[in-house]
Amino acid sequence: REKLVAKAKGIVLGDPMAAGTQMGPLVSELQMRRVLSLVETAAPQGATLLCGGVRSSAAGCEAGWFVEPTVIGDVQPHFSCFQEEIFGPCVTLVGFADEAHALALANDSRFGLGAAVWTRDVARAHRVAQGVRAGIVWVNAHHRNDPSSPWGGFGHSGVGRENGWEALHEYTETQSVVVCLDDTPFDWFGGAERYN
């Protein structure tokens, strides 16, 4: 927990075109307000804001839609910050007893865009990845996307897929055309000779 908080606090915010920047702004003011609004629900529900959760006032960030990297602890599965897709620099910490409990927590959502499994046990990685209801599952990584791999969520996390062959199918409609080149009348309901 302390290492995660230290890592979050060390993330450098700024102009995404600057070489030293590790994280840029959110896409819009509306999204920034949505993220901050969801973070603000955490403490009244019983969670602990461990870092971030505010608009950044760092040099060069004052005029942008920057939110400080946020870590929320003591989260329960029914809290809004756990149940909603925040789409901002926020992570919620929820303890679990065992693998089955972790899977139950991960799948206790109407959303399922992406998930990450962190383990050194290859068998567990595959087992948990198969059990998580998410469109993409990373193992010992997060948000590494291969353009040849389909991208899209389960449940309320979207319809269809981007990337990969699946994306090409999103842009096509299949049509069958049957052409009869014989002028002989054909009666589909005409009797047994149709099967000859």
Image (cartoon, helix red, strand yellow):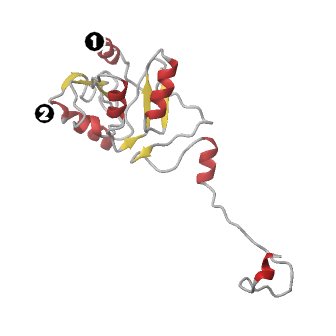
Q: Name the spot of residue 73 as percent of width and height, x first.
A: 23, 23
The residue sitting at 81% across, 77% down in the picture is 180
Q: Is residue 153 left or right of residue 25?
A: right
In percent of the image, x 37 and y 18: which residue is there? 11
Is 42 or 103 nearer to us in this picture?
103
Quarter of the figure that contains the C terminus:
bottom right
Q: Is residue 60 left or right of residue 128?
A: left
Left or right of 105? Residue 45 is: left
Category of crowding for the residue at label 2, using alpha-carbon neighbours closer than 10 angstroms: few (below 14), some (14–19), many (at least 20): few
The image quadrant of residue 100 is: top left
- Asked which secondary structure carries label 2, the reply is helix
Above or below 56: residue 84: below
Quadrant of the image containing the N terminus: top left
**Residue 2 circle label:** 1
Mark number for residue 44?
2
Identify the residue at horizontal 52%, vertical 27% (top origin).
144
Which quarter of the figure has residue 145? top right
Look at the numbered discs 2 and 1 and tell me whether their residues touch, using CB distance below 8 Å: no
- Residue 186 got which mark? none
**Amino acid type for the residue under numbered disc 1:** Glu
Q: Of label 2 and label 1, which has the lower sequence position? A: 1
Label 1: which secondary element: helix
Furthest residue toward front: 192
Give whichever of 106, 89 is nearer the camera.
Answer: 106
Q: Nearer the viewer, residue 162 or 55?
A: 162
Q: Reply above or below: 184 against 144.
A: below
**Most foreground residue, 28 or 125:** 125
Mark 2: which amino acid? Pro
Name which quarter of the figure residue 69 lies in: top left
